[in-house]
Amino acid sequence: MKRVYLSIPHMGLNERRYVDEAFTSNWLSSVGPNIDAFERAFSKRIGLPAVALTSGTAAMHLGLRLLGVGPGDEVIVPTLTFVASVNPIRYLGARPVLVDSDPATWMLDPGLLAKALADRVARGVRPKAVVPVHLYGQSADMDPILEVCRRHDVPVLEDAAEALGTTYKGRPAGSLGEVGVFSFNGNKIITTTGGGMLVAQREEWVNRARFWSTQARDPTVEYHHTQMGYNYRMSNVLAGIGRGQLEVLDARVSQRRALAFRYRDAFADLPGLTPMPQAPYGLHTNWLSCFLVGERFGASRDDILRALEALNIESRPVWKPMHLQPLYAGCERYGGEVAADIFRRGICLPSSSSLIPEDQDRVIRAVRGLAGRRLI
Ligand SMILES: Cc1ncc(COP(=O)(O)O)c(C=O)c1O
């Protein structure tokens, strides 16, 4: 039986042509027409200036530095996320402070964030940034988050790595904070094989990130440096893939949403299998189709993971919260029980936009076959 993967690249019609153009014109490094066109098209889509980078993680690193995060600072981040939201805080010598999720959305809990910010400020430490993360294609509830951050004068970096195409009250996720970060990793809704994008309200910040991403070389003939830089710029070849992928983004969003709703309909009669909430304030791309497995389902989340693997179907648990990671267990935190429960019971099912109905039916049949049947 052929393997069904969780989330794989899905090319459109023009990616190869743009890559060929890079070869033909010999623009094969980190400058060239594809990068310019990709940044321009992305910027138009999000409504903010943009710089293309080697990864979402690199974009997080530069974004936090733009916000002035440095040694000893605190940065608030949800505990329920992928580790790449948090590692760049440590790259800069700062301390993550972890906040729990809202069970109604799975995203950063705005009420708890307000408490955490008030508490930090009362202790005399104003966090240097708040990093809401838009998980699995759903936006965090940005209005109350932005309101409380403005009240405490703390800037917001949106980790929209999983949320290209997502909207919040009609506006693109990633465009609402001071800085936004996106990923084009191979498993994302569109991919450049690996890559990322940073957007910011201020054009000057985007230019500074671009400067840092190319070793912060001062504009002189000799190699002159006054600031520390990185080798984080996207190549013109990969930007060609990104150009083509951006042209099919809306189709990919529709395809992923259709898969999620097909799973939902197919499982609607199964007690104890609850789809990830779709918050009313935005468009959830359902980058990954996620479910919570409750007692009433009969089999556990791990039973489902194992049974699918035995059928050569890839599925994954929801992200393991940061406070349960040895790397971040020592961080200060506010709550964590909601995230821990979502992790313990959450599963991501195959969600590639190229998944054909016959293969999705294999997944559906396998999950339905487990209902009411505890395996161990
Ligand atoms: C929430 C989140 N943040 C950051 C990243 C980092 O992106 P990249 O893999 O492009 O470095 C990812 C994806 O990998 C992610 O899922």
Image: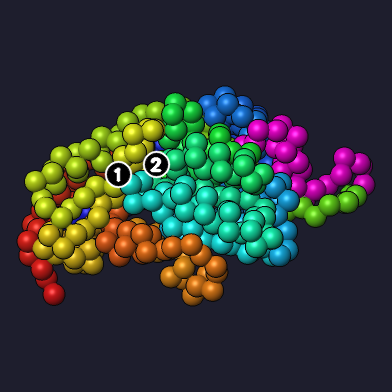
Front residue of 366 and 5: 366
| Residue 23 picture location, percent across and down | 60, 36
Q: Which numbered mark, 2 or 1, is in the foreground of this view? A: 1
Asked if the residue at label 1 sits under 8 Å from ligand 1, the reply is no
- Amino acid type shown at disc 2: Gln
- What's the mark number on residue 298? none
Whole-number angstrom distance, CA of label 2 to CA of label 1: 9 Å
Number of residues whose C-alpha sits closer than 10 Å to that of mark 2, classed few (under 14), some (14–19) or many (20 or more):
many
Residue 145 visible somewhere in the drawing: yes
Residue drawn at the location 32% of the way across and 59% of the way down? 342
Q: Farthest residue toward the front?
A: 122
Q: Which label's residue is closer to the chain start, 2 or 1?
A: 2
**Cβ–Cβ under 8 Å for marks 2 and 1:** yes
Q: Residue at x 22, y 54 (%)?
A: 2
Magenta segment: does it hold 196?
Answer: yes
Residue 78 at x, y percent in the picture = 48, 56
Residue 299 colored in magenta in the image = no
283 or 41: which is nearer to us?
A: 283
Where is mark 1, residue-wise?
277
Looking at the rendered structure, the kind of residue marked 1 is Pro
**What residue did someone put label 2 on?**
138
Instruction: Mark 1: give few (<14), some (14-19) or many (20+) Cα within 10 Å.
Output: some
Q: In which quadrant of the rendered view does residue 175 lie?
A: top right
- For the record, the magenta segment spans 195-222
Position of residue 366 relative to residue 352, above or below, is below
* Rendered view: 340 above or below 330: above
Q: Quadrant of the C terminus?
A: bottom left
14 in relation to 119, above or below = above
